Image (cartoon, helix red, strand yellow):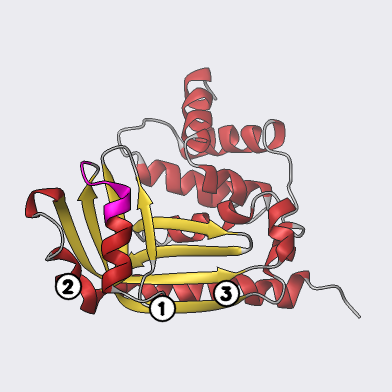
Amino acid sequence: MSERISFYVNKYIEGDPTIKVGLQRGLITSRILTKHIIEEEREFKGSFDDVRNAVRKYADETVPLFNLKNTYTAFKDSYIDVRSKLACIEISRNTETKKILELVSKSTTNEDFVRLSNNEKSFLLIIREEDTDKITKLIKKDYILSVKSDISSITMHLDPSVKYTPGVYFLIMGQISFSQINVYDVSSYKSEFTLYVDQKDGAKVHELLHNISEYQKKFCSPKR
């Protein structure tokens, strides 16, 4: 096994945190990972045995086994809420925050309004899809950067221990990433964690979060 192959394998694994977690938990074997690396990087020249030896060396020397059982305690008694038929309006930051809040309060009730966030160039207003026309008519067209409909929000209500438990959100987002689901926005408040995704992906995200919760119940709950 050459140093070049070892360097390449190390760089490949380090570039994908989900692979490292799989190795840490013993969920990915050296044979499966070797096959994946060779198939993924067809231009990479290295024999199966050389790549597998490099994977084994990395796992033995670099990746300590990590027990995620404590991380799953944050999913104790968790439950999930789903809202569909939402829309996201992206508004230029030239618009004053006060004005946005005023038009939201005039046009929607607290039950209808979902979320207001911002970045360096815009505000993101997530509302019920049916309120889109009503809101956009109150904003100058030049200030509206984009309007996206067919969005779902999936909120997972976690155990309060999530505030003191490392790795919880990484575990969630790792599952989302593996399923190649695009996330438009993320919000959290105390022990609530919300993902905003395409409506077509809402059921899949619900299933992924449900499966994590079920795993906690079956394998991580204290035995009586």
Badge 3 element = helix
- Image quarter where the C terminus lies is bottom right
Where does residue 181 sit, x and y in percent of width and height? 36, 61
User: Residue extending furthest top?
Assistant: 3
Q: Position of residue 13 (x, y in %)?
A: 52, 37
Q: Is residue 83 above or below residue 41?
A: below
- Which amino acid type is marked by label 1? Glu
Of helix, strand and loop, which one carries label 2? helix
Q: Residue furthest right?
A: 224
Vertical placement of 96 versus 210: above or below?
above
Q: Are marks 2 and 3 in contact (CB under 8 Å)?
A: no
Q: Is residue 186 left or right of residue 99?
A: right
Q: Which residues are magenta?
A: 94-99
Which of disc 3 and disc 1 is earlier in sequence?
1
Q: Amino acid at mark 2?
A: Lys
- Left or right: where does residue 84 sit relative to residue 208? left
Q: Which residue is mark 2?
A: 134
**Hey, which quadrant is residue 134 in on the image?**
bottom left
Q: What residue lies at 63% left-to-right and 73% top-to-bottom?
A: 213
Q: Please give the name of the residue rendered at 36% of the width and 44% of the height, measured from the top-left corner.
A: 40
Whether residue 82 is situated above or below residue 173 in the rendered picture = below
Classify residue 120 as left or right of residue 65. left
Q: Which residue is mark 3?
A: 211
Instruction: Tell me the amino acid under the disc marked 3.
Output: Asn
Pair 1/3: label in front: 1
Sequence order check, earlier mark of 1 and 2: 1
Name the residue that disc number 1 marks: 111
Which of the two discs, 2 and 3, labels the residue nearer the N terminus? 2
Q: Quadrant of residue 106?
A: bottom left
Percent across and percent down for residue 55 are 58, 37
The residue nearer to you, when weighing 133 against 147, is 133
